[in-house]
Image (cartoon, rainbow, N blue to C red):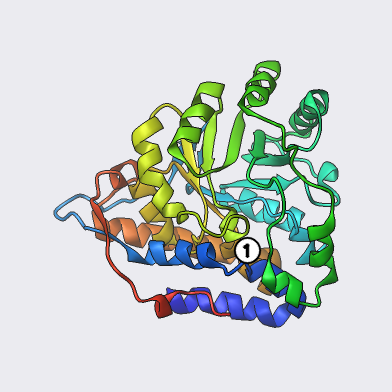
């Protein structure tokens, strides 16, 4: 599996301009969290159960009323257009074809032109950079365009130093560092509560939670789902690995809301690990961008099929006939050598 992930990344590297690839692959500062995400996933082991009926294995789940073929979300990517001008439409089409969730980011130049088709589990990701009235208008507009709900990204009060971007010749990525702040820095939990109260018929996710206390506050505010994320290692470079956020948050708020996690996930086995720790949905960013960059919608669709088959194989070997059974699997973190980390420079 390690070699397959590497193959997709190397293929993307050959297809993209040098600066665009650096922007896609890089993280903040020294890229500690970028590496930590991957290392923590590799160190996590699951203990198989035996003599269980796994003659039929299902990866299907219900997520907020949507029947998903696999518990996957193609994460919002603000600079998706750098890969291809029509990438957002291609990503949505691939997700639709494979019966999974996806999100379109508000930072895309043509974000307001994208419409979710009926039956999609499509979400609109929004940065909070306007007043209360503006926020409500943006959320209502997303609802009219057919989206299932709104993902509020709350971990970008400013852009950190991203050394690969600074060193590359990718002027488009550099400009993305120089645009006005995407997040209104005085937005607080009170503002979130007011927004949810003003739009009670819109499901909200809060993306960027990294502390169980904030997870509790999000539940109290009335969110439909908590989205655990360290922005793929692109924001604060001295925080925990994404997979390490799961257990304490599940203990604190498990059952009170749905829990999503992203950060370093790139294969069906990675997804299974997150589900075993209590995630309801696993979001993937770079992991799907590499096959899309290398082969467009067709290769992304094929990659999603591969990921589903990887999940089925992993669940069969673990003795879990469905996603709920994965939560009964015991897990343990063991040391892993740093040189085994999957993403090459």
Up-down: is 10 above or below 238?
below
On the image, the x and y values in percent for residue 279 come to 42, 44
Q: Which residue is mark 1?
A: 28
Residue at x 40% of width, y 52% of height: 244
Q: Is residue 86 visible?
A: no
Q: 46 or 307, which is in the foreground?
A: 46
Q: State the quadrant of the N terminus.
A: bottom left
Q: How many marks?
A: 1
Q: Measuring 76% from the left and 77% from the top, which residue is drawn there? A: 168
From this view, report whether residue 292 is shown above or below residue 92: below
Question: Could you tell me residue 94's position as x and y percent?
Answer: 65, 56
In terms of secondary structure, where does tag 1 sit? loop
Would you call the spot at circle 1 few (<14 residues within 10 Å), some (14-19), or many (20 or more)? many
Say which residue appears at 70% left-offset and 31% top-offset.
187
Can you say whether 273 is above or below 135 in the image? Answer: below
User: Which quadrant of the figure contains the C terminus?
Assistant: bottom right
Give the image location of residue 278, x and y in percent: 37, 42
Residue 248 as seen in the image, left or right of residue 224 = left
Q: Note whether residue 331 is visible.
A: yes
* Quarter of image, res 141: top right
Horizontal side of residue 62 vs 94, given as left or right: left
The picture places residue 267, in percent across and down from the top left corner, at: 46, 63
């Amino acid at each position: 599996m390690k070699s397959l992930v590497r193959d997709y990344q190397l293929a993307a590297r050959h297809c993209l301009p040098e600066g665009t690839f650096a922007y896609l692959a890089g993280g903040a500062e020294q890229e500690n969290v970028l590496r930590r995400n991957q290392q923590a996933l590799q160190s996590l082991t699951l203990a198989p159960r035996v003599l269980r009926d796994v003659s039929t294995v299902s990866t299907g789940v219900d997520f907020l009323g949507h029947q998903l073929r696999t518990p996957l979300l193609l994460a919002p990517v603000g600079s998706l257009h750098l890969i291809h001008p029509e990438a957002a439409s291609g990503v949505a089409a691939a997700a639709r074809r494979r019966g999974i969730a996806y999100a379109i980011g508000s930072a895309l130049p043509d974000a307001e032109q994208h419409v979710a088709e009926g039956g999609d589990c499509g979400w609109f990701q929004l940065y909070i950079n306007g007043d209360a009235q503006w926020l409500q208008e943006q959320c209502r507009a997303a609802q009219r365009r057919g989206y299932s709900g709104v993902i509020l990204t709350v971990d970008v009060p400013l852009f950190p130093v991203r050394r690969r971007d600074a060193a590359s010749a990718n002027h488009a990525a550099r400009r993305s560092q120089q645009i006005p702040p995407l997040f209104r820095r005085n937005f607080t939990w009170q503002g979130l509560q007011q927004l949810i109260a003003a739009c009670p018929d819109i499901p909200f996710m809060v993306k960027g939670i990294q502390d169980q206390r904030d997870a509790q506050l999000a539940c109290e505010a009335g969110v439909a789902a908590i989205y655990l994320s360290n922005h793929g290692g692109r924001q604060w470079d001295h925080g925990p690995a994404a997979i390490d956020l799961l257990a304490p948050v599940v203990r604190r708020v498990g059952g009170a809301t749905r829990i999503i996690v992203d950060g370093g996930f790139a294969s069906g086995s990675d997804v299974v690990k997150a589900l075993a720790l209590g995630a309801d949905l696993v979001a993937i960013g770079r992991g799907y961008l590499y096959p899309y960059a290398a082969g467009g919608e067709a290769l992304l669709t094929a990659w999603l099929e591969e990921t589903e088959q990887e999940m089925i194989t992993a669940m069969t070997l673990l003795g879990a006939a469905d996603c709920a059974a994965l939560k009964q699997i015991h897990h343990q973190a063991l040391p892993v050598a740093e040189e085994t980390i999957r993403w090459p420079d």
